[in-house]
Image (spheres, rainbow, N blue to C red):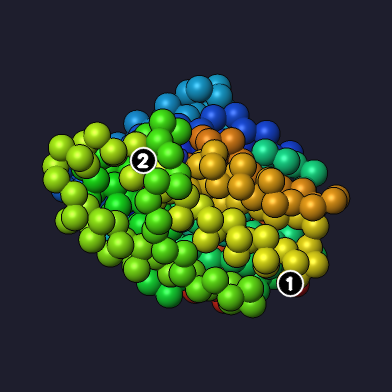
Amino acid sequence: MIILGIESSCDETSAGVIKDDLTVLSNRIYSQKDHEKFGGVVPEIAAREHIKKIDTVVASALEETGVKAEEIGLVAATNSPGLIGALLVGLSFAKGFAYKYNVPFVTVNHMDAHVRANHLAFPELEPPYTVLVVSGGHTFILNCDHNNRYELLGNTLDDAAGEAIDKGGKVLGIGYPAGRELERLSKLGNASAFNFPRALPEKVNLNFSFSGLKTALKNQLKKMAPQEITEKLNDIAASYQEAIMDQLSIKALNAMKMTGSNKLLLAGGVACNGRLREKIQNGMKGENKLYFPPLSLCTDNGAMIAAAGLLKYKRLGADPLTAGASAVFNLTEVNYGS
Ligand code: KG4
Ligand code: ZN
């Protein structure tokens, strides 16, 4: 069977085509540019841009694979969480596609899809596993049992890791989204130059907090003259990134100890970060194994939606074309394992 996955929850319009053995045939991603000047995603603009691009993105994914629309056996679309107007574009397109070509349709939870992106990279991967989910809008630690049921072990009390990166990036004037540039600058700087706080250090606490760190960055910059900031930008970036990655890696490794799991998965856009991967890898012991998808499958993409859609369809069958969208993340929605 060939599966088409459609993603439009934020500022990426994407269509992925995969086979049911989890081979990725195409993964077309259009990243909207219009938000950069606002330093964050403008929901109304995002929805309108999705409408403009969805047709061509899906068509180009199909064209790249040589698969005809009639040959698609399942169409999956993100319906939660995300910007509601943006979600509705991809969801409605997928429903129209399913209706026209008479193929089954499933809704997909975006966070579940970030986790399942790991299965595209490692088709033999099976739960149980522990997952650090780090995206622009969410940061939490999950345990996934052998029945594919998730348990929430820790969550952010304020900002998501990606939000801390992007808001910090805005203060530093390094563009939006800031993750890649922050990582690039950090490689040129000294991560011990500035002492930024690490919140909630207690071993048993798997929650996160980043708002104090953001304030610490602003306070640090207030003490510096513009020229000094420019001169020390790499050191500031490296120290700020290190504080975020320290908190994430320590909590993820503690979660593994608590669950006794020997597999840790990274999921979401911040999982692109080389320093995060390195820190966790360095902290791994014995037989424990770290999994993360390649960069193109970490950030928002249609192939991961197809992968999560396939898993859900195998367990529950198709969803009705009346299925709605929801802006907020709800763990019970993704716990469809038997
Ligand atoms: O998962 P994602 O593509 O979108 C959401 O579902 O939110 O994650 C986007 C986030 C942004 O905050 C972006 O700055 C961050 O991922 N990101 C990175 C890197 N590449 C993207 N963060 C750190 N290092 C990177 N290399
Ligand atoms: Zn995402």
Q: What amino acid type should be assigned to the residue bearing mark 1?
A: Met
User: What SS does tag 1 mark?
Assistant: helix
Marks 1 and 2 in Cβ contact (< 8 Å): no
Q: Which mark is residue 258?
A: 1
Query: In the picture provided, is 240 more to the left or to the right than 167?
Result: right
Viewer-proximal residue among 318 and 160: 160
Mark toward the start of the polypeptide (1 vs 2): 2
Viewer-proximal residue among 162 and 224: 224
Query: In the picture provided, is 123 more to the left or to the right than 208?
Result: right
Residue pictured at 75% horizontal, 67% vertical: 257
Viewer-proximal residue among 105 and 245: 245
Query: In the picture provided, is 43 more to the left or to the right than 16?
Result: left
Query: Where 146 sits versus 117, above or below?
Result: below
Residue 6 at x, y percent in the picture: 46, 46
* Mark 1 vs mark 2, CA separation in Å: 34 Å
Label 2 beta carbon within 8 A of ligand 1: no
Label 1 beta carbon within 8 A of ligand 1: no
Tell me if mark 1 has few (under 14), some (14-19) or many (20+) residues whose alpha carbon lies within 10 angstroms of its own.
some
Quadrant occupied by the N terminus = top right
- Looking at the rendered structure, the number of numbered marks drawn on it comes to 2
Q: Which mark is residue 26?
A: none
Residue 237 at x, y percent in the picture: 36, 43
Residue 82 visible to the viewer:
no
Q: What amino acid type should be assigned to the residue bearing mark 2?
A: Asp
Residue 125 at x, y percent in the picture: 77, 48
Residue 11 at x, y percent in the picture: 32, 46
Q: Nearer the viewer, mark 1 or mark 2?
A: 2
Residue pictured at 45% horizontal, 55% vertical: 243
For disc 2, the marked residue is 235
Residue pictured at 66% horizontal, 41% vertical: 120
Quadrant occupied by the C terminus = bottom right
